Image (cartoon, rainbow, N blue to C red):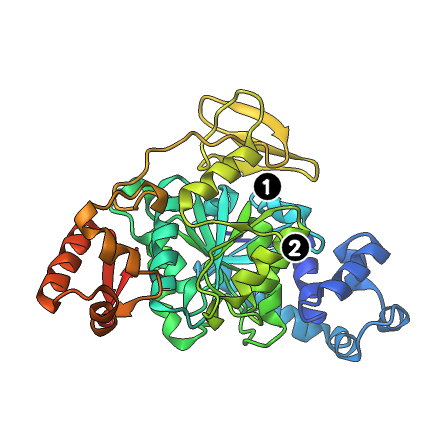
Amino acid sequence: MTAVTSSLSDDQRAILALWYEVNASLSAYHKLITTYGDAQLAWQATVGAWKQLGLHHTHLKRHEQPEQTRAAIDKIQQALTDGRYGLLFAGQPDYPAQLLHIYDPPPLLFFRGNSARLHQAQIAIVGSRKPTAHAQKITFDMAQYLAQAGYVITSGLAIGVDKRAHLGALAQTDLDYQGRTIGVMGTGIDVNYPNHRDQLFAQIIEQGGCIISELLPHTQPHKHTFPRRNRLVAGLSLATIVTEATIKSGSLITARLTSEQGKQVFAIPSHIDNSNAEGCHHLIREGATLIYHPQQVLEDVNGQLDYGKRSYRPTDIISADSHQVEVTQSSVASNVKRNSVTMVSQPEPSHIKSPRSAIVVPVHLTQIYEQLDWHGQDLDALVIATQLAPSQLIGQLMELELMGVISVQGGRYLRV
């Protein structure tokens, strides 16, 4: 674990005290800081003074019990000392600079794993908790491709698309590319939610990734904590990809926040009768960029990050004050405008297929290939559609599968 705050300063204890007493309420915390100027003065203010600010009665009740607050901070201090997690404060250089530009940056972040990932260029991948098999594959391959291109994949640690995004980023044989993923939690840093996520958490940390939360330790999941998580996923990333999502998916919140932050939203299309992809189709209708290959993401993001003729890698460390982003390499150090980084183009990994427009299918296989789509058809339907003998049809399907242009999932043949 990197950059662990082992001994809290008085200012940091005061920040934690406020964060604890307002129960991680961003509006209440920022109201106190705006009124009093710093955390120590805010914490020293009387309950009556807090009441005049119109703070919630539960915040006032906690402020009436400073000993409980100190005890909670002591527990956090002990956990930091034991190395159970780390803590970053907004005023520190190790705090991710990207978050300083969002509307409501958290005053602190708890983390486990390699916090240096927070300063590398990130692309968010989000989507349905119940994705189709095709969406799972697309998500995994896209995350793997982008991680090999040098980006860190950021997502929300949920089941479904989020998990496949993290696993795709982790599926690297080259040690130099491992661990390029960040998981943003909608719970306290020490809460494994859902319960079976502990294995994924461990894999991310062991391979050099990072898990973060703005919420206090022991905070349980709540319907309000996940939109908060989504704003951090959007805030940390240069762009967001939605691979599959329903019209009411929380992923659309992440997409909206990404757009509001002036960043690009990408969406993958599907069949018009796929209710699981209605959210993606809605995003495309509203102006999101339609993509069908990760190279298209790289081209667009690289175009956004161009600055003069300089070339940097997305793995370069990003740090910033409220106005600039600094990209640092061992041989290059340059202050440039926010998000002004040019990625060095990378060769396309062999395990990722070229865009579909580049696929060349032999003439004798064209008939069967044109009958296939990305949703999948079973053998009986293909026999009827092609009028081929089953033995001939199976032979052609095997040829296409060996070419790597189709796959078989659950007895259904589909394009890849």
Rendering coords of residue 157 (x, y %) = 45, 64
Residue placed most toward the observer, 126 or 235: 126
* Res. 159 image quadrant: bottom left
Locate the C terminus by quadrant.
bottom left
Name the residue: 62% across, 49% down.
99
Name the residue: 47% across, 56% down.
268
Residue placed most toward the observer, 306 or 268: 268
Which mark is on residue 322? none
Residue 9 in view in this figure: no
Q: Amino acid at mark 2?
A: Gln
Above or below for 35 versus 24: above
Q: Which residue is mark 2?
A: 12
Q: Secondary structure at mark 1?
A: loop
Q: Secondary structure at mark 2?
A: helix
Name the residue: 53% across, 67% down.
278
Rendering coords of residue 391 (x, y %) = 8, 66
Rendering coords of residue 106 (x, y %) = 65, 57
Q: Which residue is mark 1?
A: 93
Q: Is residue 153 left or right of residue 93?
A: left
Q: Amino acid at mark 1?
A: Pro
Task: Give whichever of discs 1 and 2 has the lower sequence position.
Answer: 2
